[in-house]
Amino acid sequence: MKACIIAVGSELLTPLRVDTNSLRITERLNEIGYEVRHKTIVGDDVDDLTEVLSAELLSADLVICTGGLGPTDDDITREAVSKVTTRPLEMHPEILERIRERFARRNLKMADINQRQAMVPHGAAVLENVNGTAPGLWLEHHGKPIVLLPGPPREMIPILEAVIRDRLAPQSGGLGLFRRVLRITGATESDVDARSQPVYSRWQQQDVPISTTILAVLGQIELHLTAIASDRATADRVLDFAVEQLEGTLGSIVYSVDGSPLEAVVGDLLRRTGWRVAAAESCTGGLLTSRLTDVPGSSDYVEASAICYSNRAKVDWLGVDGALIAEHGAVSDPVARAMAERVRVKAGVDVGIGVTGIAGPGGGTPGKPVGTVAVAVSTADVTESRTFQFIGGREQVKYQATQAALNMLRLLMLGL
Ligand code: ATP
């Protein structure tokens, strides 16, 4: 079942207001098996809205509009719907009475313009608005529901919940859209696609088809698997099988299958192995430790960290051999290794991490361009290091460096 959402309001086309209503509506529609095919934002122009609405009604099974139900001239949703469905606007005495009462309760007299909010396209059903004057409306056009909801979220949400529960869910025959998110790091988007495509392409033809989307996000790739099924147990069965197949194909680059962020996955491993961790951070300036400590309960395994930004701090505070820096440069595998080893010993922990790099925009050289980052992880038994070449601005390089460091720690703990 295909749905489309139209958010009405010129303010939503400015940088000042974000259309959050459609996210909420999408979430709730997905849960009852609707796939949202289009989301459109239209300004307060009756011709524009008429055009968009007519076009959407050609392909969608359900259209939900939010906003533009207020009392002023620029509130044009009712008028556009009336035009498209060729249902005249009629005064609805009960709505008028309810609006009057609402004003009277606050000792106010209803302004004449509020009468507009009681005008509804012929045959529309009223969806009560407990938090405002403009009610929601439900009408059907050639068998397709059109739902009109007010714009303010605190008014829109209760009406949406009621319309889903009382009208749309019963029509959907128990269908639901179920999703799994696999998170991957340490591979490129094209690499992930090349490896996983032969697996996921098979699932489009099965009884309960799964659609797959690949998303490249900073420092990681996400594979979104979506299935529409009649109940959760059926969806779980096909999605669990799909996740298992993908994990088998992609191996250790998959770090989470339940949406957990990398710092939480690493935290979980640290807790299970009983290790405590310390980090010596140069170019990441504390971001790595910040991410580690974003996880509730991280005091179970985070001991200490040192931000050793200058060479002097690396030598005087941490105890890195100055000769190493002179010979290899501060951004090098040997220095990252020394940082990881020193912080482990100084903090008296099981594992140390060292990160040193060039976040940019300045400081790069032909041999070590901006984005070069050396990362090391060290235990009493082994020290591993790697130099990465990241692209992007300063913030992106810093984030990717923390992602790489967390991932190296994860792989070390998994013995991979
Ligand atoms: P009102 O009776 O309050 O005028 P309305 O249905 O006409 O209700 P709008 O005038 O379009 O709604 O919007 C009122 C306010 O609601 C906007 O200023 C904005 O703050 C919020 N709003 C409207 N649409 C959205 C949306 N899609 N997402 C988030 N907020 C919204």
Image: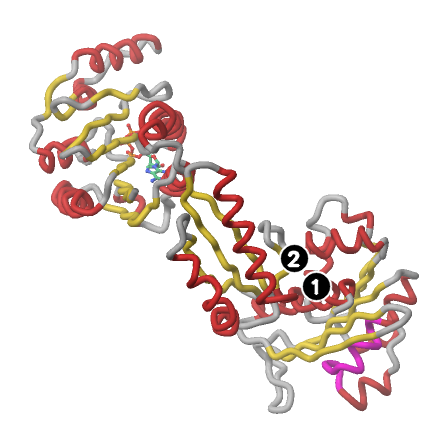
Residue 317 in sight from this viewpoint: no
Q: Is residue 336 above or below residue 402?
A: below
Circle 2: residue type = Leu
User: Residue 357 location, x and y as percent?
Assistant: 68, 76
Residue 143's place in the image compared with 260, above or below, is above
Q: Residue 229 in the image: state x and y as whole percent.
A: 42, 42
Does 83 appear above or below 13? above
Q: Is residue 11 left or right of residue 298?
A: left
Can residue 27 be found in the magenta stretch?
Answer: no
Q: Is residue 330 magenta?
A: yes
| Residue bearing the label numbered 1 | 406
Q: Position of residue 90 (x, y in %)?
A: 10, 21
Distance from the alpha carbon under mark 1 to that under mark 2: 7 Å
- Residue 52 in view of the camera: yes
Quick one: label 1, few (<14), some, or many (20+) residues within 10 Å?
Answer: many
Q: Which secondary structure dominates the residues rendered in magenta?
A: helix
Discs 1, 2 touching: Cβ within 8 Å: yes
Is 337 left, or right, of 127 in this rendering?
right
Most foreground residue, 408 or 106: 408
Q: Secondary structure at mark 2?
A: helix
Taking depth in this image into account, of 240 and 157 the one nearest to the observer is 240
The residue pinned by badge 2 equals 262
Kind of residue sitting beneath label 1: Leu
Work out whether residue 212 or residue 138 is closer to the camera in this orientation and state it.
212
Residue reaching furthest to the front: 207
Magenta residues span 329-340
Left or right? Give the position of 400 relative to 193: right
Q: How are the colours assigned in the image?
A: secondary structure
**SS at circle 1:** helix
Residue 199 location in percent, x, y? Answer: 48, 64
Which residue is drawn at the image coordinates 42% and 63% (left, top)? 201
